[in-house]
Amino acid sequence: MADVFLSYKRDERAAAETIASRLRDLGLTVWFDASMSAGETFNAEIDREARAAKAILVCWSPAARKSEWVNAEVMIGFEEKKLAACYVAGPDRFSPPTPFNATHAEDLRAWLTAPSVTHSGWKSVLRRLGKLCGRGDIQSYGAIETHASASDLRAWIDRYTGSPLLISVDRLLKAREAEEAERACLEVEARARRQREANERRVQETT
């Protein structure tokens, strides 16, 4: 049983492979048709894997929207309340067919040109998949705010010391610590400046 079943149209095979690779880097097992066993009946294996997966991630594109296979796979995720969705191709006003348009889809078109663990759309996908797959580290990483405090980031690191995302969060922590140190320094300088100005006013008032 895979953690994530990837539903996509073959036109977007490169996008599916990129997404699968990044998810596997996080320790999630991923199934898509490249994982098929030789000699198995195509529709039987796909149906079995889609129903067994903890999450179904659909990669929407105009071609996927028209695909009976993709729509059938997505219906399984929709009915079993384990559907996650993203856009991998298509125009800005493109939308999935009803009823799948009721499930929010994150735009990964730009992310696919330069995959990054800090991309907001990718983090949203991770938040959903982490929840469906029972991976608290992935779900909570996806929920980390852009301006999370150093204390919040330290708390995440203390809780998920073995997570594949540890390096990414540690990098965020170092950047936040530098920002907070600089802010503290500026506040000290501002207080000192205000104190000097107050002292100067008092001197002027007594002369």
Image (cartoon, helix red, strand yellow):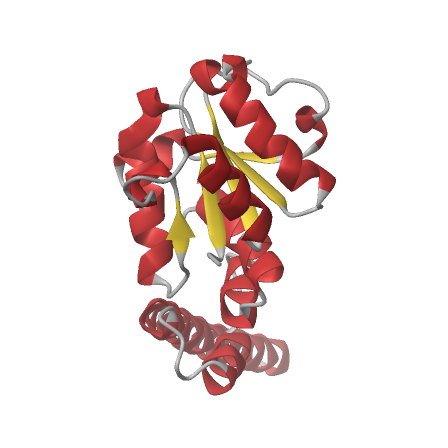
Q: Is residue 116 visible?
A: no
The residue closer to the viewer here, 95 or 118, is 95
Q: Is residue 118 left or right of residue 146?
A: left
Q: Quadrant of residue 28?
A: bottom left
Quadrant in the picture for the C terminus: bottom right
State how many labels appear. Answer: 0
For residue 27, above or below residue 99: below
- Left or right: residue 140 compared with residue 118: right
Image point 44% across, 73% down: which residue? 180
Q: Is residue 99 left or right of residue 26?
A: right
Is any part of residue 166 visible from this angle?
A: yes
**Vertical placement of 64 versus 152: above or below?**
above
Q: Residue at x 54, y 82 (%)?
A: 199
Image location (x, y in percent) of residue 202 = 60, 81
For image coordinates 37% across by 63% down, the residue present is 26
Residue 193 point in image, percent of width and height: 47, 74
Q: Position of residue 58 (x, y in %)?
A: 51, 35
Q: Quadrant of residue 186?
A: bottom left
Instruction: Decide which of 164, 97 is in the foreground and name it.
Output: 97
Whole-percent x, y for residue 198 in the image: 58, 77
Residue nearest the viewer, comparing 184 with 75: 75
